[in-house]
Amino acid sequence: MAKTIAVCNQKGGTGKTTTTINLASALAVLGKNVLIVDMDPQGNAGSGVGVNKNEIKDSLYDVLIHRILITQALVKTNFSKLEIIPCNINLTGAEIELVGVLSRETRLKKALEPIKKNYDFIFIDSPPSLGLLTLNTLVAADSILIPIQCEFYALEGVSQLLNTITLVKDGLNPDLHIEGVLMTMADFRTNLTNEVIGEIKNYFKEKVYNSIIPRNIRLSEAPSFGKPINFYDSVSAGAVKYRELAEEFLIANGKAQQPTSI
């Protein structure tokens, strides 16, 4: 049965989609069956694994609103052991359409139940907001991975996210917990990066991953080619760090590694 992880931070530009794509891909290379669920209406997770969001017939929107079987929206990527439920801009309308729906917070959770047995991990790329789409994400998830950019306002919005997590735990998903906190876009040439890392570690303690994702041109380029970083440039600093993160993630989850070739 899959463990479901929400990649979530209400602040934009923290590396949520980059982390979803590249951690999922790195785990797939290590032999795990992984599903990405693109809950961000921008649809960038799909683009990042080579899915043309403008050519999607059935998407996550249809799963949530029209209640089609989630398998109808499932897309196999060109990368072994990695699949995705893509979305497009239509998902924006779901925020409004779900408002008057009974059990609106549990639509995603119920949709995923029949296929959870097929995967080791499910990663949900959440939108940079705290609306009904994010609420569905948090209700469906077992845990939350929080990417935080190494910048001056690193903790901006995190307290609101933590308050939301507490509310969800109290009312809808009592077992929800923080999987880990990932520092992204680090530039070790600056004092600020080290100061922010220290601040985040002081705040989140042992929840902060040892793996820190650097600013990396190749990481930025990879999505435009529809490839995760380990298939675009496997020796780049970004690819190395996401592999390290995947190994750290598996150790934390007690999962043995089964390396395979790219």
Image: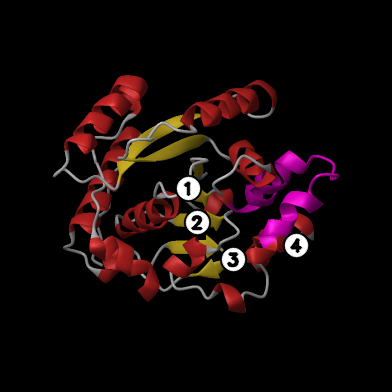
- Which residue in the rendered view is the most extreme toward the bottom? 55
Mark 1 vs mark 2, CA separation in Å: 19 Å
| Residue 99 colored in magenta in the image | yes
Mark 4 vs mark 3, CA separation in Å: 11 Å
Q: Which of marks 4 and 2 is nearer the N terminus?
A: 2
Q: In which quarter of the image is the C terminus?
A: bottom left
Q: Quadrant of residue 261?
A: bottom left
- Which residue corresponds to mark 2? 36
1 and 2 marks in contact (CB < 8 Å): no
Measuring from the top left, give residue 250's x and y in whole percent.
Answer: 32, 41
Q: Closer to us: mark 1 or mark 3?
A: 1
Q: Is residue 79 visible?
A: no
Give the structural element (helix, strand or loop) at label 3. Answer: loop
Q: Earlier in the sequence, mark 2 or mark 3?
A: 2
242 relative to 183, above or below: below
Give the structural element (helix, strand or loop) at label 4. Answer: loop
Q: Which residue is painted at 34% across and 39% down in the image?
A: 182
- Which residue corresponds to mark 3? 74
Q: Three-letter amino acid code at disc 1?
A: Gly
Q: Earlier in the sequence, mark 1 or mark 4?
A: 1
Q: Three-letter amino acid code at disc 2?
A: Ile
Q: Earlier in the sequence, mark 1 or mark 2?
A: 1
198 relative to 24, above or below: above
Q: Three-letter amino acid code at disc 3?
A: Leu
- Which residue corresponds to mark 4? 68
Mark 1 vs mark 3, CA separation in Å: 26 Å
Q: Which residue is painted at 43% across and 49% down in the image?
A: 16
Q: Is residue 85 left or right of residue 217?
A: right
Q: How crowded is mark 1: few (under 14 residues within 10 Å), some or many (20 or more)?
A: some
